[in-house]
Image (tube, coloured by chain):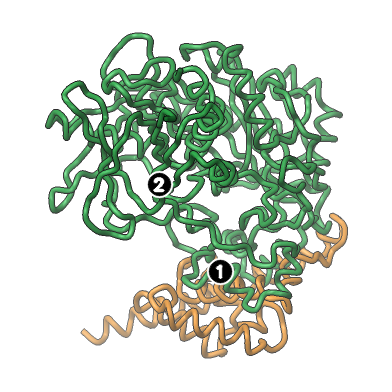
Chain colours: A green, B orange
Amino acid sequence: MRPEVTVVGSGASGVHFALTMLRRGYFVRMVDVGHTRPPASHPDATLLELRRLHDDPADWFLGGQLEGLTLPGSEGEFYGFPPQKQFVFRRPAGVPEEVLEDFEPLFSYAKGGLAGSWTAGVYPFNEDDLKEFPFSYAELAPYYDEVANRIGVAGQCDDLERFIPLHAGLLEPLDLDPGSRSLLERYAAHKDVLNRRLGCYLGRSRLAVLSRDHADRSACTYLGRCLWGCPREALYTPDLTLRECSGHDSFEYESGWFVEAFDVDETRRARSLIVRPASGGPQSRIPVECLALAAGTLSTSRIYLESWFRMTGVRHVLPGLMDNRQVLVPFVQPRLLGRQYEESSYQYHQLSLGLEADRPAEYVHGQITTLTTAQAHPILQSLPVDLKTALYLFRNSRAALGLVNLNFCDRRRPECQVTLATGHEGQARLSIRYEPEAGEADRTRREVRRLRKVLRKLGCVVPPGLIHVRPMGSSVHYAGTLPMSQAERRGTTSPLGRSHDFENVYIVDGSTFPFLPAKNITFTLMANAIRIAENAFP
Amino acid sequence: MFDYLVGGVPSPYVLDWYIAARETHPERFEPRGAWDRTLERAAASRVIPLRWVDGCCAIFAPASAVRRRLILMAAILESFPGTYRAFEVPDAPSPIRFAIGATPRVVASALALTAGTAVFSLLYLTTLLRKKSSF
């Protein structure tokens, strides 16, 4: 009989853990809510063709409930998620709202998790980023190679290598759009000043997007539809790996279940998952032999806290919640005014930049996105002129517009924590509290000032009054509540993700990260999940 | 509104979509308060040019019903094959031509804003005085 492991969650960590365990001969059961992606409409059509071919194009762009419409005075982000990605965030019936203090998180209950709506940036951590981890870069590096081989990563060796190590299997970079090309040319011309005086290095983004056919997936054909979800699966999402898992006889995917907790026996071994139907209904149980929690930091923390509470009657606090602070800095490239933007291009960031810091791990990571097919109406309404004039200014400057998304690292601190609160009818609710680090605002201002100088050198203008500091929780890079630790402390795990509190429970997602560099963590989540699957089990 | 944004007459598709969206989500497009209603009436009356109302709202009442409805119309138009070009295809094919084209438009916009502000200030004062005299 095959040994068995039950995985909770089908996000980036869960699917790569599951696939590795399947390849190692285990029987894997995955329990998930599993909302599914709606089928792509006219999957081979460009965005322009889609407008003509679709029976109801406004419905495709704006959605039946106007989910894709951003109105002035609406709270929230500048751009919402389009109708095609709403499935990622749909809440199961009866799941209580969280109690939030200075934190605005996103949760996913979809097949593939939050990475169903990611921007595909893959950035391996380097030795400096991993200093607080209980393993070295050399120990993690082979698993980066393995992930790259599974998902396909486009990129190249360039100046960013000083922050972002190279891994095996890098595919050729994607074709650059004119806005990004122009920035890269300016960078080449002013490299010395940018490197030496401003500590800024620019290069191609590493992207989980296929620049050539890879395994059973086809290369990107530049349909211009990335923002609405790649219809050709060239942009990697974890549900593709879930599909690969489903090809194994020893894989069972149990969707439609919201996991509340697990119960344990007297030796603190998890015996079963306590679940509820996602559509509402009574509790039931799914027996487990060995449990791997991969529901994402916040959901994993909730399951862990609820299980601890059921076992002891005590509401535990998990300190150390981390997230990347993000600052959005829009810019204009005046030399591109009046040019037609290129619809047939990759829509998310094609370039990245690194700003050196005194302490290497505190380097600031920036992703540069040039505006292509994104909807115009959210931008039009933010211009301080009538819409007729705004429309003229916008269509003639569209190709010249861009945005830098600056990311800052975060450290575990006791004041940033998750715990359980009681909701109405006695239901447990996740309570999340975040407090920015002292001096964070000063540091952010300083780095934005430096970025302004960088952009000026690159021939760009930063329009006044449009820089936006995103609320904590927006980056969706949550980590740190159940950190890996050599010491056997409560609320921690071993270096191989095994809980120090429960005998047969492993945490394989970002909860276990003891430090959060400024980079997107998804690539490292996948590599770490494979590392645990390869080394923690016989 | 259609004519103001892109010129011409709206297709039945655009009109139907606009009406359906407003009817399905009245809470998002109806005026919120007396002054918002005044702005809406001013925009609908055509006595005051829509550009004046829009220009004033862009600065002083960005979340007014007038702006919300204009943004809804803009969002439909940029999705529609017959009108998306107004949002995407430049008509000033160089930075210099852009500057030449933008200058008179921005000046006209500023004049519309000034005129609109003057009219609405008078309207606002009249409303206040009427309220006061009714006591």
Residue at screen point 83% across, 41% down: A182
Left or right of A158: which side holds A348? left
Rate crowding at label 2 as few (under 14), some (14 to 19) or many (20 or more) other CA atoms within 10 Å.
many
Left or right of A482: which side holds B47? right
Label 2 element class: strand
- Marks 2 and 1, how far apart in space? 29 Å
Where in the figure is residue A310, as x and y percent of width and height? 16, 35
Marks 2 and 1, the one that precedes in the sequence: 2
Discs 2, 1 touching: Cβ within 8 Å: no
Q: Residue furthest top?
A: A487
| Snapshot quadrant of residue A478 | top left
Question: Foreground residue, B31 or A45?
Answer: A45
Q: Residue furthest front?
A: A1
Left or right of A139: which side holds A496? left
Question: Foreground residue, A218 or B90?
Answer: A218
Question: Foreground residue, B118 or A107?
Answer: A107
Specify the subunit that label 1 lies on. A
Can residue A475 be seen at all in this image of the molecule?
A: no
Residue at screen point 86% across, 29% down: A189
- In the rendered view, tell whether residue A376 sits above or below residue A240: below
Specify the subunit that label 2 lies on. A
What amino acid type should be assigned to the residue bearing mark 1? Answer: Leu
Rate crowding at label 1 as few (under 14), some (14 to 19) or many (20 or more) other CA atoms within 10 Å.
many
Label 1 element class: helix
Residue at screen point 64% across, 62% down: A376
Which residue is under mark 2? A32
Quarter holding the N terminus of chain A? top left
Which residue is under mark 1? A62
Where in the figure is residue B62, as x and y percent of width and height? 49, 66
What amino acid type should be assigned to the residue bearing mark 2? Answer: Asp
Establish whether labels 2 and 1 are both on one chain. Answer: yes
